[in-house]
Amino acid sequence: MLFVFMLATFVGLQVIRNVSRLLHTPLMSLTNAIAGIAVVGSILLAGERESDLTTILGTIAVAASTANIVGGFLLTDRTLKMFREKQK
Amino acid sequence: MNAHLIQFSYFVAAILFILSLRWLSHPRTARRGVGAGAAGMVAAILGTLLAPEIVDYKWIATALVIGTVIGIPLSRVALTAVPERTALSQAFGGLAAALVGTAKYIVWLQHGELTTFRTSAIVLEVILGSLTFTGSLMAAGKLREIISGRPITYRNQNLVNLSLLGLAVVAGLYLAFFNNAYWPAFAAIVVLSLVFGVLLIIPIGGADMPTVISLLNSYAGLSAVAMGFVLQNKLLIIAGALDGSSGLILSIVMCRAMNRSFTNVLFGAFGQVQPATAAGEARTVKSATPQDCADLMTHADRVVIVPGYGMAVAQAQHRVHELYELLTKRGVDVKFAVHPVAGRMPGHMNVLLAEAEIPYESLIEMDDINPDLPQTDVCLVVGANDVVNPAARHDKGSPIFGMPIIDADKARTVIAIKRSMNPGFAGIDNELYYGDRTLMAFGDAKQVIGDIVKAVSDDGTGAH
């Protein structure tokens, strides 16, 4: 698991170093959306019907992560649409 | 069968996330990146829904709908408000991590399934999640100016803050290694981390927000990683690590652009009004009318515009675009010099200018444009201040000494548009304004540029 973490961080650093500085704001909203991956853990919790309390916590967590996913991807796309090349 | 399918969907999702970030390296492929990211997320969610431990889909479905309903308006905010929105989204990420961690602690405590490893991972997840949650909410509040953007300091601030965090860590170690059933220690960790998040952001000034947002971005990613360790889920670890490394890189870029270290940003309380060093010394400025500015720029070969957050506050970017169009049509070479920390989050200025329909080829990074400034006829400074302050180069007493700046003062003529002679966000006087070749155009940026545009186009109806 630690190995996976270190490898992913290494890949992340390599890939993100190459992101154009022009796009640092979309990069942030895109990674916000990707961090919405917390939805995976939240879904497992909300669906396993362990107790009322854990279901409530899970449901809030799914809603918060989904808001990040939906908001993040839509906003990134909207921002990127604005970057246009010079008209020839 | 399902187990394989779940693993496969996670594998696909991880690959798509990496490609998504890779395609962000150029504006031309960037939108494809969004598609890949979204597809990866759909794969991850569908895969998770197949998990055998899910027995009830009702609440999941409800939450997915609620989240979508909250998420859509959050994607439609004005681009000037994107920093707040980003902070808010990081708060959501932190919240999700803290809640899942808390729930897992409760469940495993009741079943007697807490191990040292599980408890440590949960403690890490809850500390990171909670402090990201309140810290990001504070940052959003400061950016929205619900909370004062000025740093709030008190005696022994760093000592108090670090002691709180230290206490939370000690409580965590106790839980992990001695008595994982002692739930008041767990509650204390949650409370201490929440308070620490608030106190961490209180002393940080508005000018440091780009760094702070990047750092919180990193924490939000790391809390997802910690969740991955708790749930033994590789996809959470990978996606969280990608988010974490993006936050780390952005923080480094921001810190370098200000010539400051992480610790200095977090513990330095930058942004207080500094006592003016040369107080009382009468210094004169030369002022210019919009007509003067128009004449200078229409007769120039090369104009460099330095935009700052003030431009966005005055909503002047569309006027700036008109000016850009008019001058370009007349054959003037117009470029924009973008400082990495201009605006309130990394890359903020670029997005605002792109929204105003300025082609991205004309947006030039500081390091690439500085060599051209000595051959520039007019450098127009719109709402930027500290990033063009020459004191950063030579005045050892200045709080911004050592910060890389855009060499506006090296241009043949500088025009600075400014509301008044008040110092900028960092509270430092700017000697650029007193330079021999500097002209000040006083007034609201939108108004002044509007007047310049009018003067240029009136002139254009005559000869040329």
Image (cartoon, coloured by chain):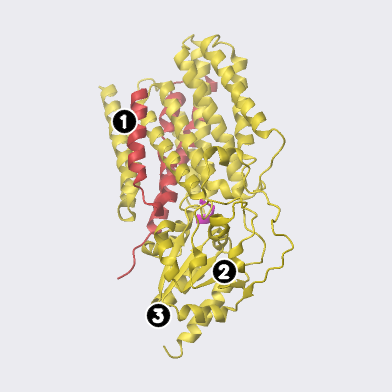
Chain colours: A red, B yellow
Three-letter amino acid code at the position of disc 3: Arg
Q: Position of residue B381 (x, y in %)?
A: 53, 66
Left or right of B337, for residue B136:
right
Badge count: 3
In the image, which residues are magenta? B78-82
Among numbered discs 3 and 1, the one appearing first in the sequence: 1
Q: Residue at x 30, y 39 (%)?
A: B16
- Disc 2 chain ID: B
Three-letter amino acid code at the position of disc 2: Ala
**Can residue B23 be found in the magenta stretch?**
no
The residue that disc 2 covers is B416
Q: Quadrant of the C terminus of chain B?
A: bottom left
Among numbered discs 2 and 3, the one appearing first in the sequence: 3
Q: Residue at x 50, y 57 (%)?
A: B405
Badge 2 element:
strand
Q: Compute the Cα span from label 3 to label 1.
A: 55 Å
> Does the rendering let one see residue B16?
yes
In the picture, the disc for residue B315 is none
The residue that disc 3 covers is B330
Q: Position of residue B443 (x, y in %)?
A: 63, 71
Front position in the image: A45 or A12 = A12
The residue that disc 1 covers is B10
Three-letter amino acid code at the position of disc 1: Tyr
- Disc 1 chain ID: B
User: Marks 3 and 1: CB-CB under 8 Å?
Assistant: no
Q: Compute the Cα span from label 2 to label 3.
A: 22 Å
